[in-house]
Amino acid sequence: MRNILTAVIGVLAAHATAACTREQLTAATADLLVVQTTGKLDGAASFTSPIKYTENRKTVDLGKGILSQALTIAHNRSQHDVPQCAAFSELIVTTAAKPYVIATQLRLDNATQKISQIDSIVTTKGDWLFNVTGTYYWASREKWDPIPTNKRDTRETIKAAADAYCDIFNNKSVKVPWGQPCARLEGGSYTGKGQASDRCDVGIPSGVKLVNRQYVIDEVYGTVDVQMDFAGTGGFGVGGLPDSHEFRVEEGKLRYVHTLSSCGGRSCM
């Protein structure tokens, strides 16, 4: 009887906290795209005031950040996390004068279903391995479609795969569920060739802590985006770098990894 009551309470709690729907989150990422392409914050139904906004892990006035610029988006992809009322968008801008690759997490207020928090990692010329041509080329060729229902991993499995990848940078004994093929897009550098032999377990440093992690998970697509401080306690001569790592997990194994690291105008090569 106790086990039944516990299960019922767990279900009720899940419904109580999951105040957002996938449709509302999809509308929010669609509004994000409209705002970023127009540079106008007003007129987007999902945007409310105030919105807590960070850009490269620092609090910024929303009206002075990257969203105030009208950008031509060459590639975009979004994922939606219903239990957390959160979403993630990857935006690629190939304009020669001002190229960008942007990783944005959104969070909606449970009561209003409006965006209450936006956190963006914005990379451009001079950032770690930045090459927007390479980023666009490879990202547009990858397959990030919905995973069949009977093959979807749990949120816990997806998050654990991401955490294992992040943990191995500081602890080489960690067992990472590497998939094969697996391809890592780091800046504009790609570890794959579109072949069955592609691997992600190459070029991983040692003694580097990836800390202060913030997640957006989408079981439908097998994805998790992790925003964090790369080498948070020091590294590359500049301290922690604002960083986004997004993972695609298929049947418990890593399939794709997209990484962005902002150097904040400092040299981190």
Image: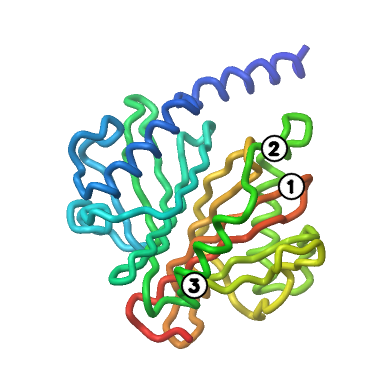
Vertical order, 86 against 233 (above or below): above
Considering only order in the chain, which callout, 2 or 3, is on the residue closer to the N terminus? 2
Give the amino acid type for the residue marked by disc 2 in the picture. Answer: Ile
Seen at 73% across and 61% down, the residue is 182
Quarter residue 94 falls in: bottom left
Q: Say left or right for 218 vs 107.
A: right
Q: Say left or right for 168 vs 95.
A: right
Seen at 55% across and 55% down, the residue is 140
Vertical order, 18 against 212 (above or below): above
Q: Position of residue 158 (x, y in %)?
A: 68, 47
Considering only order in the chain, which callout, 2 or 1, is on the residue closer to the N terminus? 2
Q: Residues within 10 Å of mark 2 (few under 14, many from 20)?
A: some
Quarter residue 194 falls in: bottom right
Considering only order in the chain, which callout, 3 or 1, is on the residue closer to the N terminus? 3
Q: Which dot marks residue 147?
A: 2
Q: Which dot marks residue 187?
A: none
Q: Position of residue 214 (x, y in %)?
A: 50, 53
In whole angstroms, how far apart are the C-alphas of marks 1 and 3? 29 Å
Give the amino acid type for the residue marked by disc 1 in the picture. Answer: Glu
- SS for tag 1? strand
In whole angstroms, how far apart are the C-alphas of marks 1 and 2? 8 Å
- SS for tag 2? loop
Give the amino acid type for the residue marked by disc 3 in the picture. Answer: Gly
- SS for tag 3? loop
Q: Which dot marks residue 250?
A: 1
Q: Nearer the viewer, mark 1 or mark 3?
A: 1
In whole angstroms, how far apart are the C-alphas of marks 3 and 2? 34 Å
Seen at 64% across and 37% down, the residue is 146
CB atoms at circles 1 and 3 under 8 Å apart?
no
Q: Which residue is mark 3?
A: 232
CB atoms at circles 1 and 2 under 8 Å apart?
yes
